[in-house]
Amino acid sequence: MATVILLRHGRSSANGSGVLAGRTPKVDLDETGRAQAEALVDRLAGVPLAEVVTSPLLRCRRTVGPLATARGLDRRPESRLSEVDYGDWTGRDLTALAKEPLWRVVQSHPSAAVFPGGEGLAQMQARAVAAVREHDARITAEHGEHAVWLLCSHGDVIKALLADALGQHLDSFQRIVVDPASVSVTRYTETRPFVLRLNDSGGDLSGIVPEKPRKRRGRKLASDAAVGGTTGGKDRA
């Protein structure tokens, strides 16, 4: 299967406001976020991209805009990668929300958390995982298993995707940190995903591109983990 770059949107005007933005419309990138979006063009220069799939929310579309334009790629919207529907919590002050009984559930038992008037975190993970695996299978069929594609979404959504890839229960997803404009990378195979990068906020990403074998054409990327650790090569086949 293909390799997917999980990109959290750049810093938004809401990130430092102390308010839970959720799906509030027109939440845009701030000055730092715009600079982070522009920096992606050079940061991913060594990574050929087959496709860009993004949450339909403005802050995600803005984040991938410069990169998609530079590569001549369309931005494919995917509603299942949208932010959590926080329902009645949307737009409220985080300090006030921390006093709600549900806050402790979100922190310690997120799989049981359902936001009033919104969705549950388990529901969010199910829709996001289904979307990623469907797009990955489609892109692999169209571009081959050595393809790399980019997904732009939100912090909790990406944390839930990484928990799934790591084989962790959703109740452990709060242990994963995903900063604005950070990159995490997952490569799916026939039997398991491999997490290649986690919350990476700088540096060259060309090393994530799977190397096409020069011999024995048609080899598939291996699903088995390397005993004793990898040799550092790109290709797991």
Image (cartoon, grey):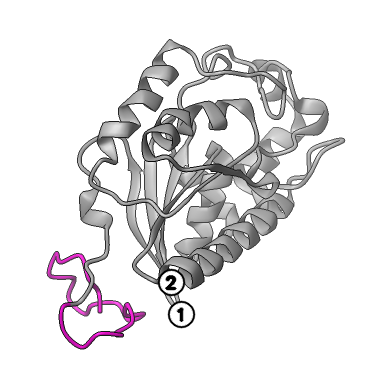
Query: Which quarter of the rendering shows the C terminus?
Result: bottom left
Task: Give the image quarter of residue 187.
Answer: bottom left
Q: Is the magenta stretch mostly helix, strand or loop?
A: loop
Q: Name the residue under label 1.
A: 190
In the picture as drawn, the residue positioned furthest to the right comes out as 117
Q: Is residue 118 left or right of residue 159?
A: right
Residue 168 in view here:
no
Mark number for residue 1? Answer: 2
| Cβ–Cβ under 8 Å for marks 2 and 1 | yes
Q: In this view, does 49 lie to the left or right of 45?
A: right
> Which amino acid, by three-letter code, is at mark 2?
Met
**Residue occupying the point 84% across, 36% down:** 116
Q: Is residue 198 left or right of residue 30?
A: left
> Which amino acid, by three-letter code, is at mark 1?
Glu
In the picture as drawn, the residue positioned furthest to the bottom comes out as 216
At label 2, counting other C-alpha atoms closer than 10 Å, the crowd grade (few under 14, some 14-19, many 20 or more) is many
The location of residue 18, given as percent across then percent down, is: 59, 15
At label 1, counting other C-alpha atoms closer than 10 Å, the crowd grade (few under 14, some 14-19, many 20 or more) is few
Is 111 located above or below residue 212 in the figure? above
Is 102 located above or below residue 213 in the figure? above
In the picture as drawn, the residue positioned furthest to the left comes out as 231
Residue 9 in view here:
yes
Query: Which quarter of the rendering shows the N terminus?
Result: bottom left
**Residue occupying the point 32% across, 33% down:** 41
- Which region of the structure is painted magenta? 214-237
Answer whether residue 226 is magenta in the image. Answer: yes
Answer whether residue 217 is magenta in the image. Answer: yes
Inter-mark Cα distance, 2 to 1: 7 Å
- Nearer to me, 210 or 231: 210
